[in-house]
Amino acid sequence: MATNTYSPLGRGFFGGRIVAESVPANSYLTFHPRFQGENLERNKKLYLQIEKLAQKHGCTPAQLALAWVLHQGDDVAPIPGTTKITNLDSNIDAVRLKLTEEDLKEITAVVPLNEIAGSRTLDRLSHLTWKFANTPTKEKKTGI
């Protein structure tokens, strides 16, 4: 899982519907590289690993993904989007998950960045990513 806080549920991927069913024909995700053909099949295998870990922690894969992001530091917050109140309530419940360092390492090991298939943005939108922004570097705290 990436520490990027935008779309921490992988554009709905960790909600599981796309894994259990398929990408709806009228969805913009049909154009997304991670949801096409072989990429989707490879990513489904990663989802199934997260699903097993979520069961171990007594939560949903989406809650585990959000909890993982929440544990990345005090300056990191997930920004999930939803259109359903039940999903919002479930997302809020992710705050209750307390993950240990070992848990975080296990989750990271199950979804190594180099095994996620497909780019995270559409090629035609890549020029709009943070890589092209004029963002200042983070200053170190000095304790003064």
Image: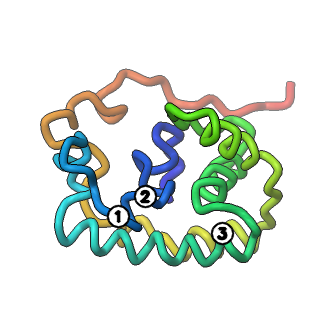
> In what element is the residue under mark 1?
loop
Q: Is residue 54 left or right of residue 45?
A: right
Disc 2 versus disc 3: nearer the observer: 2
Query: What label sits on residue 90 in the rendered view?
Result: none
Give percent across and percent down for residue 45.
Answer: 40, 77
- Name the N-terminal-most of marks 2 and 3: 2
Give percent across and percent down for residue 37.
Answer: 17, 67
The residue lying at 48 percent from left, 54 percent from top is 2
The residue lying at 77 percent from left, 45 percent from top is 95
Q: Is residue 111 left or right of residue 94?
A: left
Contact, mark 2 vs mark 1 (Cβ under 8 Å) = yes
Per the image, the residue denoted by label 3 is 54
Per the image, the residue denoted by label 1 is 21
Per the image, the residue denoted by label 2 is 17
Query: What amino acid does circle 1 point to?
Result: Glu
What colour scheme has been applied to the protein in the rendered image? Answer: rainbow
The residue lying at 78 percent from left, 62 percent from top is 99
Q: CA distance from mark 2 to mark 3?
A: 16 Å
